[in-house]
């Protein structure tokens, strides 16, 4: 394999569609990773260029090439899908969020990421939770670990509708409900607050603390809910003036 000159590398980065096609045909056997990445940075590199790179099996022995090809917008869908399986979770997160990538590839990256979630450490899942896509949020919101949920609550893509099923779930983890109720943003959203206070799994001290912030319809619901502690129901009655 001959070493490519700086002039050739520059042409790989800047050549137009036709020149790049001809150039790749002539140097394909001599491409190393830096040269292939120069092609990937060329704004005129399309599906044909991606196929040439993917056909160089020795290049695909390098992780960075498999990653960069999988995440390139011009990579043909079958090639990108085949390369996803070997990506690290951080790169699957990036793939799921990159709107330049074909939707089918993004969804596949999200699916592979969700399949791996059970085997990841708490810290890894917390890192994912801070920036996860909406589809991955749906999987992470059921995590029983307060640290993961705390990270998820800071995700700018999280919406109220993602949290209400968690706030009302009959098997919710009490520490998770506490994290939700005391969060600086979501704990002040009335539907979320009301749902958590009315959840029998919410720690009693926190529920009692937030009960006075509920409106009369929710206070009546608390007072009449036999699943809730007697202390919580009695306080609701007092707040109603009963």
Image: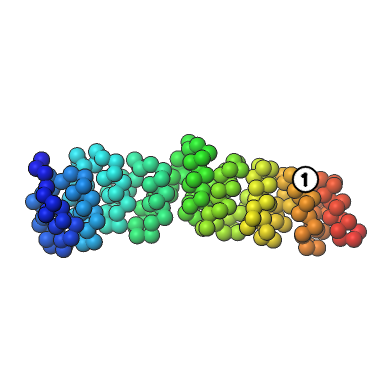
**x and y percent of residue 241 in the render?**
90, 61
Q: Residue at x 26, y 40 (%)?
A: 62
Give the number of marks.
Answer: 1
Density class for disc 1 (Cα within 10 Å; few <14, some 14-19, many ≥20) is some
Q: In this rendered view, identify the residue nearer to me: 61 or 199.
A: 61
Residue annotated with mark 1: 204
Residue 227 in view in this figure: no
Q: Could you say which quadrant of the image residue 86 lies in? A: top left
Q: In this rendered view, identify the residue nearer to me: 79 or 86.
A: 86
Q: Is residue 113 left or right of residue 160?
A: left
Residue 237 in view in this figure: yes
**x and y percent of residue 206 in the render?**
75, 48
Q: Is residue 141 left or right of residue 231?
A: left
**x and y percent of residue 156 in the render?**
52, 58
Q: Residue at x 80, y 57 (%)?
A: 212
**x and y percent of residue 151 in the render?**
55, 48
Q: Is residue 18 left or right of residue 167?
A: left
Q: Residue at x 24, y 56 (%)?
A: 41
Q: Could you say which quadrant of the image residue 90 lies in? A: top left
Q: Residue at x 85, y 52 (%)?
A: 235
**Residue most extreme to the front:** 6
Q: Could you say which quadrant of the image residue 23 lies in? A: bottom left
Q: How is the image coloured?
A: rainbow
Name the quarter where the N terminus is drawn.
Answer: top left
Name the quarter where the C terminus is drawn.
Answer: bottom right
């Amino acid at each position: 394999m001959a070493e490519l000159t700086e002039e050739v590398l520059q042409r790989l980065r800047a050549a137009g569609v036709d020149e790049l096609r001809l150039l790749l045909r002539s140097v394909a056997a001599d491409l190393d990773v830096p040269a292939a990445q120069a092609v990937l940075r060329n704004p005129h590199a399309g599906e044909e260029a991606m196929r040439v790179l993917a056909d160089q099996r020795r290049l695909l022995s390098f992780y960075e090439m498999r990653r960069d090809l999988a995440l390139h917008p011009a990579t043909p869908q079958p090639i990108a899908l085949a390369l996803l399986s070997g990506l690290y979770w951080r790169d699957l997160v990036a793939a799921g969020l990159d709107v330049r990538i074909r939707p089918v590839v993004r969804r596949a990256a999200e699916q592979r990421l969700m399949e791996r979630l059970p085997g990841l450490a708490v810290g890894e899942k917390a890192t994912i939770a801070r920036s996860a896509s909406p589809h991955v949020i749906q999987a992470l919101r059921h995590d029983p670990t307060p640290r993961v949920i705390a990270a998820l609550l800071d995700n700018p893509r999280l919406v109220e509708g993602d949290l209400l099923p968690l706030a009302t779930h009959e098997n919710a983890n009490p520490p998770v409900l506490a994290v939700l109720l005391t969060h600086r943003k979501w704990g002040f959203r009335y539907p979320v607050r009301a749902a958590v206070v009315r959840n029998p799994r919410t720690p009693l001290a926190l529920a009692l603390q937030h009960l006075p912030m509920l409106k009369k319809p929710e206070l009546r619901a608390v007072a009449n809910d036999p699943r809730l502690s007697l202390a919580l129901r009695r306080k609701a009655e007092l707040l109603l003036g009963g």
